[in-house]
């Protein structure tokens, strides 16, 4: 307890500088999947006044349960990490958002947060993709992050519960981000588990630790079934953004042939960002990337809802990722041309 108080006081004396040093040297990034550098979130420009810190415990991706276990087993360290990050941005109020299908985590967090009146735990509906930061901010505060904007534009800083734990370990123990909690599951895994895995460990070694495959997998995902990235081999490493490994048997994977868009509008109804995925997909398909950007392509969070509901089996998210990559290449060429002049 005395060490905790000393750490908090030390951070309070030179808040941003101290936090930046710990987090940069520790390589701390967001562990919700995006792996965005944490020190950047704790260093908003002076004109962006942060009034609320949100801790994201809404693990909404199907199959994944690692955050749930972390919230139950490392509760006090998560609360300490949250308090450190609150000091880092100078806020007095924080909300931890957890979906109601995690009652044990909610109870543990409420008990650990009870001594701190500025921290509250909010129960959320179990709904995908509520774990996306813009959706979570809207649910908890009613604030809408503007198009092309960031949470700091509405006075909010937000991080994952796993990130809070990593912050505690970096500041209190000097431990860099060398491991993370992740879920290994799916119908083709013999013994599904939640594990703490070193960064750089081969997928095959992790799967072997879980008893290997119970059946031949037809799809192996880095991440969950909605936002995960398919892998063609298990000879790939666990990285900071690896929230899970999901291996599925043939009967659990529906492979359909992509067809022409039938203009049914289901993707429009499903999109949490209020975009028109059917139009964006057609624009990316026809290599009209600048037009796709104007139509909101960069606001897509790649949640996969449009792909999931599409009766024509169109690979929407794949097209959106392709479009974003091509826009990045265009921006690089423009930058190089300006520097050449």
Image: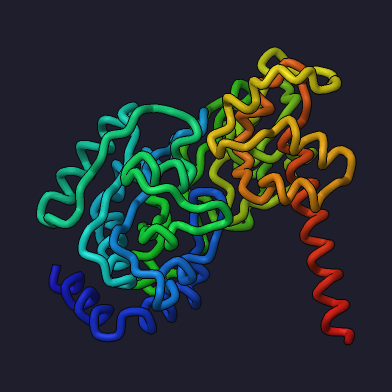
- The residue at the point 29 percent across, 62 percent down is 51
Asked whether residue 64 appears in the rendered view, the answer is no
Name the residue at 84% across, 19% down.
Answer: 257
Task: Give the camera-side residue of 202 and 20.
Answer: 20
The vertical placement of 149 against 136, above or below, is below
Identify the residue at image location x=65%, y=26%.
267
Residue 84 quadrant? bottom left
Residue sitting at the far top? 251
The picture places residue 198, in percent across and down from the top left corner, at 54, 56
Q: Position of residue 121 (x, y in %)?
A: 23, 43
Identify which residue, 74 or 207, lies in the foreground: 74
Left or right of 205: which side holds 171? left
Res. 124 image quadrant: top left
Tell me where residue 158 appears, x and y as whole percent: 40, 56
Please tell me which residue is depicted at 58% across the width and 26% down the height of the picture: 270
Instruction: Classify the position of the C terminus by image quarter.
Output: bottom right
Residue 5 vs residue 91, the one in the foreground: 91
Residue 95 seen in render: yes
Colour pattern:
rainbow
């Amino acid at each position: 307890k005395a060490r905790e108080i000393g750490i908090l006081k030390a951070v309070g004396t030179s808040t941003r500088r101290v936090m930046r040093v710990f987090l940069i040297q520790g390589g701390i990034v967001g562990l919700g999947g995006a792996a965005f550098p944490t020190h950047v979130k704790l260093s908003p420009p002076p004109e962006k006044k942060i009034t609320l810190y949100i801790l994201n415990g809404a693990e909404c991706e199907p199959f994944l349960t690692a955050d749930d276990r972390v919230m139950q087993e490392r509760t006090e360290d998560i609360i300490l990490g949250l308090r450190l990050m609150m000091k880092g941005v100078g806020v007095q109020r924080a909300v931890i958002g957890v979906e109601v299908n995690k009652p044990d985590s909610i109870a543990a967090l409420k008990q650990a947060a009870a001594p701190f009146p500025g921290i509250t735990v909010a129960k959320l509906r179990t709904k995908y993709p509520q774990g996306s930061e813009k959706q979570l901010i809207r649910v908890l505060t009613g604030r809408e992050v503007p198009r092309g904007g960031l949470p700091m534009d509405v006075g909010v800083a937000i991080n994952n519960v796993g990130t809070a734990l990593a912050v505690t370990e970096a500041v209190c123990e000097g431990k860099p981000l060398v491991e993370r909690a992740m879920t290994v599951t799916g119908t083709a895994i013999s013994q599904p588990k939640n594990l703490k895995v070193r960064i750089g460990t081969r997928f095959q070694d992790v799967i072997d630790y879980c008893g290997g495959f119970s059946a031949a997998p037809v799809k192996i995902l880095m991440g969950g079934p909605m936002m995960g990235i398919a892998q063609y081999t298990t000879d790939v490493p666990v990285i900071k953004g690896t929230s899970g490994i999901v291996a599925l048997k043939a009967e659990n994977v529906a492979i359909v042939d992509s067809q022409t868009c039938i203009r049914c509008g289901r993707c429009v109804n499903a999109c949490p960002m209020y975009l028109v995925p059917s139009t964006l997909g057609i624009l990316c398909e026809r290599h009209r990337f600048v037009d796709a950007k104007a139509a909101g392509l960069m606001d897509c969070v790649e949640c996969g809802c449009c792909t999931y509901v599409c009766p024509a089996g169109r690979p929407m998210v794949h097209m959106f990722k392709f479009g974003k990559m091509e826009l990045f290449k265009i921006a690089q060429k423009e930058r190089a041309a300006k520097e050449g002049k």
